[in-house]
Image (cartoon, rainbow, N blue to C red):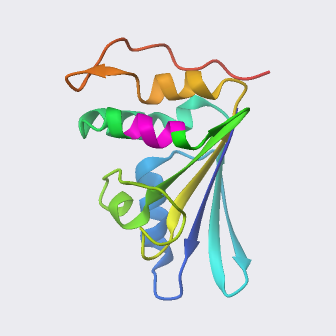
Amino acid sequence: MKITVRVEVRPTENIEKVRKALYNVFEPEKLEEKIEEDYRVLIAEGNCYKSLLKLHSLLRTQFILDAAREYLKRGMYDKGLVFYLNKQAAYVGVVSFCSFEYGESPLGAIVFHVETENPRRLIDWLAPRTINGRPIREIEPPSEDP
């Protein structure tokens, strides 16, 4: 599994606040800052499910598993998935999904790219099916891809 999270730092933003938003939803193994065009970008990487444990926990404490599952399924492809989180909501420790990278999150979204052999299993772990908002069955975290 390879997880890459990208978030723009706009000229009007404080980089420490953007970093906090990122760390509120993701635990990177590596974090670097790059300059792209006219702005800075934070690029975080992780190589296992442990980097997603904060997100996993927030989805449950906020009782948004059903909505999360739908957003995650929309971004699924053969060997991975892509999804977007609102940067301002993440700053205050709240998960709010966006449909697009730009537009719904005025300062740009936090963009997750997850490469994995079995994206459906990852979705089932992050946001399992529910009945009345409660998970039907929690599964073990996905094993590391070879």
Residue 144 is left or right of residue 129, and the answer is: right
Q: Is residue 126 above or below residue 28?
A: above
Residue 6 is left or right of residue 91, and the answer is: right
Q: Is residue 48 above or below residue 113?
A: above
| Residue 33 in sight from this viewpoint | yes
- Percent across and percent down for residue 101 are 54, 64
**Outermost residue, right side:** 146
**Magenta span main SS:** helix
Q: Is residue 103 magenta?
A: no
- Percent across and percent down for residue 86 are 41, 61
Residue 58 is left or right of residue 100, and the answer is: left
Task: Give the position of the N terminus as an image quadrant.
Answer: top right
Q: Which residues are magenta?
A: 68-73
Query: Which image quadrant is residue 40 in?
Result: bottom right
- Residue under the image location 40 percent in, 23 percent down: 128
Q: Is residue 136 above or below residue 65?
A: above
- Percent across and percent down for residue 8 are 58, 72
| Residue 54 in sight from this viewpoint | no
Q: How many marks?
A: 0
- Residue under the image location 80 percent in, 21 percent down: 146
Residue 137 is left or right of residue 15, and the answer is: left
- Percent across and percent down for residue 61 are 25, 36
Q: Is residue 114 above or below residue 101?
A: above
Q: Is 93 or 96 nearer to us in this picture? A: 96
